[in-house]
Image (cartoon, coloured by chain):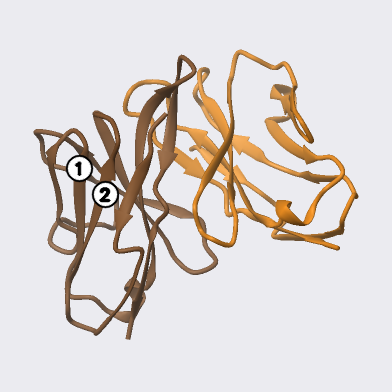
Chain colours: A brown, B orange
């Protein structure tokens, strides 16, 4: 399994500013994922971050708005740039790891972002 | 196209009642995985079960059971003798393919309220 921590757990930010969210995993993982969950909604994949390569963004998400770093196999950051109230969401880091011989996907506790 | 439908937006039951959460999926893949996750009010996503497309055996884990029916493309989740702690949003998800780059396609979730 994998234990994932995220910082900050929550934040309230002003419009136009940027916030960087950190994701730390207790084991080395190849694939890390960043999701957004808008209020009352399901999860939407923002991008897949592999160590040593550029992140792969899903349709509707761009690097300028959500730059991602993946400096090693246990850490990643997601920056929400030039924020607007529409960016208010929970941002979740996720990894794929082996558990009980199976390949499973685990999630961090999330970062609750409110943009005023 | 891959799609997951959770038709029940909200369910409210009284403690000790049994409750079934429906999940219907669409996919063109012959090999795929289905998942259920629980999201309590704290926001963290808790992995409940993973089922691959070749294993149609139903599974029971304590008060939880899952009924996988390929013929109807359904993967329903039943909680027996529900408890207040079962109150959460439950998400059904489908993997897009079984390779290393598989993405999770999420349903919109079912909010379950178990009242004392």
Q: On screen, A18 above or below B31?
A: below
Q: Quadrant of the C terminus of chain B?
A: bottom right
Q: Between B68 and A17, which is closer to the camera in this rendering? A: A17
Residue A89 numbered tag: none
Residues beneath discs 2 and 1 located on the same chain: yes
Instruction: Give the labeled residue for mark 2.
Output: A23
Q: Between A23 and B34, which is closer to the camera in this rendering? A: A23
Q: On screen, A15 above or below A26?
A: below
Q: Residue A46, how many percent across, how many down?
A: 31, 52
Q: Using a 10 Å C-alpha cutoff, classify the residue at mark 2 as few (fewer than 14 neighbours), some (14 to 19) or many (20 or more).
A: many
Instruction: Give the labeled residue for mark 1.
Output: A75
State how many labels appear: 2
Q: Is residue A97 left or right of residue A21?
A: right
Answer with mark 2 or mark 1, whichever residue precedes in sequence: 2
Residue at the image position 52 percent from the left and 35 percent from the top: B94
Q: What's the CA distance linking mark 2 and mark 1?
A: 6 Å
Task: Report the chain holding disc 1.
Answer: A
Q: Residue A112, how many percent across, how many down?
A: 39, 67
Residue at the image position 43 percent from the left and 34 percent from the top: A105
Residue at the image position 49 percent from the left and 69 percent from the top: A39
Q: On screen, A14 above or below A70?
A: below
Residue A54's image quarter? top left
Q: Residue B41, how many percent across, how many down?
A: 58, 62
Q: Is residue A57 left or right of residue A109?
A: left
Are the residues flagged by discs 2 and 1 in contact, CB closer than 8 Å?
Answer: yes
Task: Report the chain holding disc 2.
Answer: A
Q: Is residue A4 left or right of residue B34?
A: left
Q: Residue B53, how many percent across, how many down?
A: 59, 19
Q: Between A64 and B66, which is closer to the camera in this rendering? A: B66
Q: Secondary structure at mark 2?
A: strand
Q: Secondary structure at mark 1?
A: strand
């Amino acid at each position: 399994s994998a234990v994932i921590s995220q910082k900050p757990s929550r934040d309230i930010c002003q419009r136009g500013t940027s916030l960087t969210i950190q994701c730390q995993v207790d084991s080395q993982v190849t694939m890390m994922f960043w999701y957004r969950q808008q209020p009352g909604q399901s999860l939407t994949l923002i991008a897949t971050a592999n160590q040593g390569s550029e992140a792969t963004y899903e349709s509707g998400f761009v690097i300028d708005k959500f730059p991602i770093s993946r400096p090693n196999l246990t850490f990643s950051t997601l920056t929400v740039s030039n924020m607007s109230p529409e960016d208010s969401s929970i941002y979740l880091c996720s990894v794929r790891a082996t558990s009980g011989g199976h390949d499973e996907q685990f999630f961090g506790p999330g970062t609750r972002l409110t943009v005023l | 196209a891959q799609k997951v439908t959770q038709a029940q937006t909200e369910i409210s039951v009284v403690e000790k009642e049994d409750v079934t959460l429906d999940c219907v999926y669409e996919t063109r893949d012959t090999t795929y995985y289905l998942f259920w996750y629980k999201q309590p009010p704290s926001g963290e996503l808790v992995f409940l079960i993973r089922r691959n497309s070749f294993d149609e055996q139903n599974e029971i884990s304590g008060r939880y059971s899952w009924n996988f029916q390929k013929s109807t493309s359904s993967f329903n989740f039943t909680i027996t003798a529900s408890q207040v702690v079962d109150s959460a949003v439950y998400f059904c998800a489908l993997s897009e393919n079984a390779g290393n780059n598989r993405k999770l396609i999420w349903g919109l979730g079912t909010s379950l309220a178990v009242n004392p």
